[in-house]
Amino acid sequence: MITHPSYTVEPWCLRETELNLDVLAQSESVFALSNGHVGWRGNLDEGEPHGLPGAYLNGVYERHPLPYAEAGYGYPESGETMINITDGKIIRLLVDDHPCDLRYGRLLAHERVLDFRSGVLSRTARWTSPGGRTVRITSHRLVSFTQRAVAAVVYEVEPLDGPTTVAVQSELVANEQLPRFHGDPRVAAATESPLVSEEHFAQNTRLRLVHCTGSSGLRVGTAADHLVEGPESTKWTAHSEPDVSRLTVTADLVPGQPLRLVKFVAHGWSGERSLPAVHDQVDGAVAAAVSTGWDGLVAAQRAYLDRFWGGADVEVEGDAQIQQAVRFALFHVLQAAARGENRAIPAKGLTGTGYDGHSFWDTESFVLPVLTFTAPEAVAPALRWRHRTLPAARERARQLGLSGATFPWRTIDGAECSAYWPAGTAAFHVNADIAMAVVRYVMVTGDEEFERAEGLDLLVETARLWRSLGHHDPEGVFHIDGVTGPDEYSAFARDNLYTNLMARQNLLAAADAAVRHPDRAAELGVDDEEAAVWRDAAARMALPYNESLGVHEQSAGFTTFQRWNFEATPPDNYPLLLHYPYFDLYRKQVVKQADLVLAMMECPHVFTEEQKARNFAYYEALTVRDSSLSACCQAVLAAETGHLRLAYAYLGEAALMDLDDLEHNTRDGLHIASLAGTWIALVAGFGGMRRYLGEDGRPGQLSFTPRLPEALSRVAFTVLVCGRRLKVDIGRSRVRYQLMEGGPLDVLHHGEPTHLTADGPVDRPMPHAPSLPEPQQPPGRRPVGLPPGEEDRADTPE
């Protein structure tokens, strides 16, 4: 969409200069507003036309049975689907009795702007009704970062060519009719009319609806209040019924005399509180919003975002699209998590119902790394959600005959919701992903209180899972069999390298944390013997390697499989999972998404530079990127191995995943992990930033190996590390490290120790990148930005 003529490239906003119904659903996703608790899709104020109407509350779902042709032991019995809650953003308009529907009459002008610094979505339109009367419509909308339950809209209409009678209908609407999408497993399961009315209310300018879900038993409340400004003729009435509560404002207007409506909305829910309690909760929240006022909400929103950008901004010179895209990405990653407060971060955030609103390993492996260095206050609550689901994870492990905890592949409230058991049962790596998110957060923030409490629980229970899942062979080597790694085109593998390496780090981290907190470890039943068993399994972990090829194996025996026939695969047959049976995919050398490449990114100390280069080239020829999670990982390793042009192309693919709708499913919501991958590609890729556990399980030093592709002249980014604010400014020939806030910090620059203080910046030279032949991708699967069929060439040293 960023290449669509209606969209401009600007550094601090996303601007749409005309309305295009052919990309309406996609625009609703990219213009979505959220704070991690409340989410409003970027639907037009008037409600229609729409692609996918949506308002969401994090954690609100309906339960539904999972059908199986043949049931099996351990199969999840029910699924959880995020539902469209009561929509509070609708403000319908009638001009001389003609409904304002932009498909009718004449739309003279239409513009929407999402400002990343203010957090406000603004809209202006000039529309001539079928009756010939022209009006100007302006609106401003926000979902508050500072008042968690609150969203607000300012809506104004003014006639331009003569006296006009207008009616504005501000509504709360439950059980909206939703469109159906078929044939793609990534689309949500439709849940019709999931809300059962418990209370409806409308009086003066106040509205309220309270509903309950039929199966999951969650109570949802929405309240609204309004400020009305207009001529003396302005009147209003309020009306409610079970699924609609409406304020209708009428006025006779003349040019220069607008009708202005300020709408404050509060959303709340509970699985335990009574109807009066939820009723009072949303009434109180909306009263607080009215007291703050629109201007107060806007000022607080700007102050919140000023603080965020001060510790998170990434500056890019040489590519205006990437500059816009990385700020768009960071804004939406923040929106997905800022006020989640002990709830999951769904794969689509709160921008749409794709993937049923489920959370996956994406959160811990892609989203939380970004937030750890930019908004760490949002990370501990996300990990506390995992901790809250520990009882369900322990029960799942017992069901599978294992110790410790087995965290679900996909879930909203902690129960496994995947009816596809090779993922829902065998993708155990999610355990290690969660453990490493704990380790990363504690290393970067120094939050020992969290490690001692929730963190240690998570590390211990995940370590116990690995020890019970794996086994020692007669030679003492520790194997983990029958798992699905990040590459979902390979299942039931033996010794998936990513899984084994992450499990090894998990085991060492748990043993070390138990030593640091012996009293808490004793409470959990961890003794010296158990910790020694963990260390022994880690020390003897199998790491598959093919000596004849000189490459690590994604899993034991993977390099002996028949290669997929890429030449005979039509371009329209990607993603492969929609066109070929998994049976065929599982037994071939074809990689859905970065797996071993991700292992090299997460565990760089395990591999030599030569091994990284050989591994990257080998798996590059097999990886089809049928997942949005892949491009950013490939960007990082391409940069590390000196393929800067290729890294830049993968950066573009990650950055434009939604802005260009590359997977043709942005209509269902944004790819939050791919958005996070934009930051990862720039900071871990071209910035070369690493902070990881060493082989002994101890924290490694923060290190940087920056290098830039030809297309970029400068990349600068800010990260937060243990109370310090560090800015890294990468130019063509030098890198500047500047400690903006906090005490002294030691880092590595291309392996060279560098001491930083607040006294001033430190400059270091930029060494040349290695020059290697650029590896090839499967036919037809070159990244966006690389022309198809171009001959190999070495990257030119800078």
Image (tube, rainbow, N blue to C red):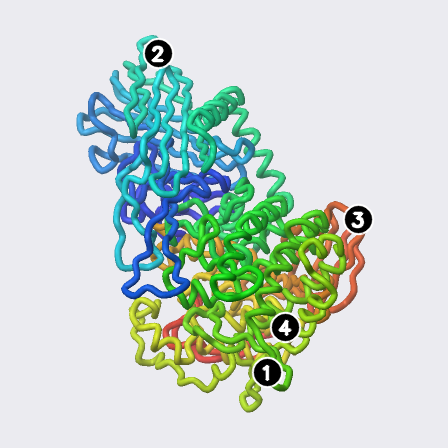
Q: Are marks 1 and 3 in contact (CB under 8 Å)?
A: no
The residue drawn where x is 39% and y is 72% is 781
Q: Looking at the rendering, which quadrant does residue 536 occupy?
A: bottom right
Q: Reading the chain from its start, which is encountered first: label 2 or label 4?
A: 2
Dot in front, 3 or 2: 3
Q: Earlier in the sequence, mark 1 or mark 3?
A: 1
Q: Residue at x 57, y 39 (%)?
A: 305
Which marked residue is nearer to the observer: mark 2 or mark 1?
1
Of badges 3 and 4, nearer the viewer stands 3
Residue, disc 3: 743
User: What residue did someone put label 4 on?
Assistant: 769
Q: Does residue 439 lie above or below 118 as drawn? A: below
Residue name at image x 29 percent, y 48 percent: 190
Reading the image, the residue beneath label 1 is: 473
Q: Quadrant of the C terminus?
A: bottom right
Which secondary structure lies at badge 2? loop
Q: Quadrant of residue 172?
A: top left
Disc 3/disc 2 C-alpha distance (Å) = 59 Å
In the rendered structure, which amino acid carries the disc numbered 3?
Gly
Instruction: Give the camera-side residue of 440 and 740.
Output: 440
Foreground residue among 6 and 219: 219
* Residue 56 occupies quadrant: top left
Separation of marks 1 and 4 at Cα, in angstroms: 42 Å
Q: Give amino acid for label 1.
A: Asp
Q: Would residue 545 appear left or right of 261 to someone viewing this image?
A: right
Circle on res. 231: 2
Q: CA distance from mark 1 to mark 3?
A: 49 Å
Q: Which amino acid, by three-letter code, is at mark 2?
A: Pro
Q: Is residue 746 left or right of residue 788?
A: right
